[in-house]
């Protein structure tokens, strides 16, 4: 039942945002990167991941987000798709904190469960004039497993034409 309410709320939020901002043009950002992932459940292993993520702004504060990652040590593919609300100054391109939720999917559900998660994320560009690098951290809580996991990583901004 929680999945249904979470999905309905997420869809309603996205549709409302799109309707309110029908004339606004979405800004899409694509990143390549690496993560460390740790799970509060000791039965699930930590791993190092390589992959990419993307974000499409639907309004100054709301974005559709997603990513796909390959777990190097345990050979899995993990991904997510959802929405995030920026709670900090949306006009600051060098620092942001976002709250949201997404559906997580995995090629190995025993290692990385498939479920809806609520999330808090931080992104910081320590040297915005020199490098296109962003340091990230994400904490997520799975609604089905009641497990928390954390990601710490680095992203490289791929400029699209």
Image: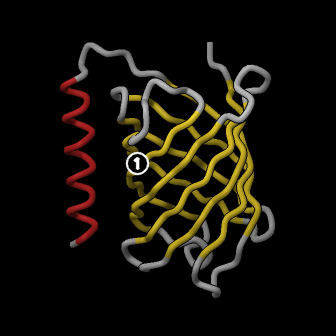
Left or right for 80, reference 4: right
Left or right for 114, reference 135: left
Left or right for 102, reference 17: right
- Nearest to the observer: residue 40 or residue 71: 40
Name, please, the residue furthest toward the bottom: 43
Q: Position of residue 3 (x, y in %)?
A: 28, 66
Residue 108, picture quadrant:
bottom right
Could you say whether the residue bearing mark 1 is in a helix, strand or loop?
strand
Left or right for 114, reference 125: left
Label 1 crowd (10 A; few <14 / some 14-19 / many >=20):
many
Q: Position of residue 47 (x, y in %)?
A: 74, 68
What residue is rendered at 20% in x and 62% in y?
A: 5
- 24 w.r.t. 81: above or below: above
Q: Quadrant of the N terminus?
A: bottom left
Residue 72, picture quadrant:
bottom right
What residue is rendered at 22% in x and 52% in y?
A: 9
Q: Quadrant of the C terminus?
A: top right
Q: Position of residue 25 (x, y in %)?
A: 37, 15
Q: Position of residue 133 (x, y in %)?
A: 73, 34
Describe the colour scheme in one phrase. Answer: secondary structure
The residue under label 1 is 82
- 154 w.r.t. 5: above or below: above
What residue is rendered at 67% in x and 56% in y?
A: 152
What residue is rendered at 61% in x and 53% in y?
A: 137
- Tally of marks: 1
- 37 w.r.t. 122: above or below: below
């Amino acid at each position: 039942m929680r999945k249904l309410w979470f999905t309905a709320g997420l869809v309603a939020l996205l549709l409302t945002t799109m309707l309110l901002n029908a004339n606004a043009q979405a800004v899409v950002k694509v990143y390549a990167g690496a993560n460390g992932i740790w799970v509060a459940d000791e039965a699930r292993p930590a791993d190092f991941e390589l992959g990419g993520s993307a974000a499409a702004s639907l309004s100054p504060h709301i974005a559709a987000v997603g990513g796909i990652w390959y777990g190097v040590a345990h050979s899995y593919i993990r991904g997510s798709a959802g929405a995030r609300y920026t709670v900090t100054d949306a006009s600051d391109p060098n620092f942001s904190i976002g709250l949201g939720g997404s559906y997580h999917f995995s090629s190995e559900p025993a290692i990385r469960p498939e479920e809806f998660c609520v999330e808090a994320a931080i992104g910081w560009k320590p040297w915005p004039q020199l490098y296109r690098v962003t340091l990230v951290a994400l904490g997520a809580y799975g609604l089905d497993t009641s497990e928390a996991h954390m990601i710490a990583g680095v992203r490289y901004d791929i400029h699209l034409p």
